[in-house]
Image: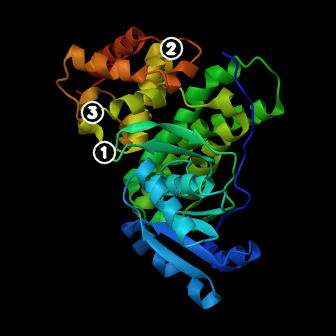
Amino acid sequence: MTLQLVSRIAPQEYVSEVCAYNRLASALKDRFIKRVLFLHGTKSMTKAVPFLPDLSEEGIEVVDVLFNGECSNNEIERMIDILKNKQLDAIIGLGGGKVLDTAKAAGYKAGAVPVILLPTMASNCAAWSCLSVLYKDNGECIGHEIYPQQTSLVLVEPRVILDSPVDYFVAGVADTIAKWYESDLLLQQADRKSIALFFSREAARQCLEIPLAHAEKAIQDMKQGKLSEDWVQVMETNIMASGLVGGFGDEYARATAAHAVHDALTIRPETHHLLHGIKVSYGILVELMIEKKYEEMNRLLPFYRALNLPLSLSDLSLSGLSNTEIREIAVSALKPTSLIHMHPMKCTVDTVYDAIIGLEEWARQNSVK
């Protein structure tokens, strides 16, 4: 497979600081933006309101839109219609990953209008990356799209994210460490020398080393509402470092097996209540089982236990699945559009099925007595 290397490194501007939202009005004016679509969730807006400026006082017209819940083609089209019908200059997305991904998709597809993102959680790299993960309206993942348009501005208000649900932060940590495990083999076997790939691998390394060193303390601090250096470092790793991996590395640093397993798990309605990163963390173990990296699995075991990450199907509300049902998950992981086809080991349905079965035995052997 011939891989391409087109680096889409970062948002045009990124600010992470207390009172970051105070920059919003002037940033819009600097971009000649006078009328905006403001897309948000209910809970995220409630958290952010105390820190947000009144844009109307600055002469900026705001069309307020409540997010429907999924980054689906229907929701994206709804945003595009609003942007075009009301002749708006830009779209602001405030919320979690699905809100941000919807804003990015709608902004690009509406004619490359500027996109401004205000993440209220650090559960993934959606605020950084110029791609969207797409879902059906029922929550089933259907893949992702990459855009040639960078986000115009990202404003991170740490106090808002600190006040977000801890379980989303934990899911973000899990999704972040996947960057190392999914990209490492691809980057090791790259058929070209490139400083971009060097930076990509270094970013991926930090996506593992920083959480392993600081995540447990950061989670404790978050539970206590403490804006500590450990927490800020992990929070920005979730958003920035994880986004830099694919930003520099493109197809040499894409998600592979772990995210393919995540996508396959979404065919089971029992998993829809689980956050993206939690399902990805299970996918990491399946990938390591495929690669027969048992020592690395044992290295991660204390970390998984400390963060209460899933080790088995029962931890995903999938206890009692038949072998046929497990094979259906493996088949879904190998669908033609699956990310697993990027994996250098050329996985098959049997490869994934055997890894899931093998992981069940490993989890039993390592269950806490």
Q: Residue furthest bottom?
A: 57
Q: CA distance from mark 1 to mark 2?
A: 33 Å
Residue hosting label 2: 291
For the N terminus, the quadrant is: top right
Q: CA distance from mark 1 to mark 3?
A: 11 Å
Please tell me which residue is depicted at 50% across the width and 67% down the height of the picture.
Answer: 82
Give residue 278's position: percent from left, percent from top. 39, 40
Marks 3/2 in contact by CB < 8 Å: the verdict is: no
Q: Which numbered tag is attached to residue 268?
A: 3
Number of marks in the image?
3
Q: Mark 1 or mark 2: which is in front?
A: 1
**Horizontal relation, residue 327 to residue 254: left or right:** left
Q: Which numbered tag is attached to residue 138?
A: 1
Q: Is residue 21 above or below residue 130?
A: below
Q: Earlier in the sequence, mark 1 or mark 3?
A: 1
The secondary element bearing badge 1 is classed as: loop
The secondary element bearing badge 2 is classed as: loop
Please tell me which residue is depicted at 76% across the width and 17% down the height of the picture.
Answer: 191
Give residue 150's position: percent from left, percent from top. 69, 52
| Amino acid of disc 1 | Asn
| Amino acid of disc 3 | Arg
| Amino acid of disc 2 | Glu
Residue in front for this viewpoint, 25 or 158: 25
Residue density around tag 2, few if under 14, some if 14–19, many if 20 or more, within 10 Å? few
Q: CA distance from mark 3 to mark 2?
A: 25 Å
Residue 194 visible to an observer of this rendering: yes
Residue density around tag 1, few if under 14, some if 14–19, many if 20 or more, within 10 Å? few
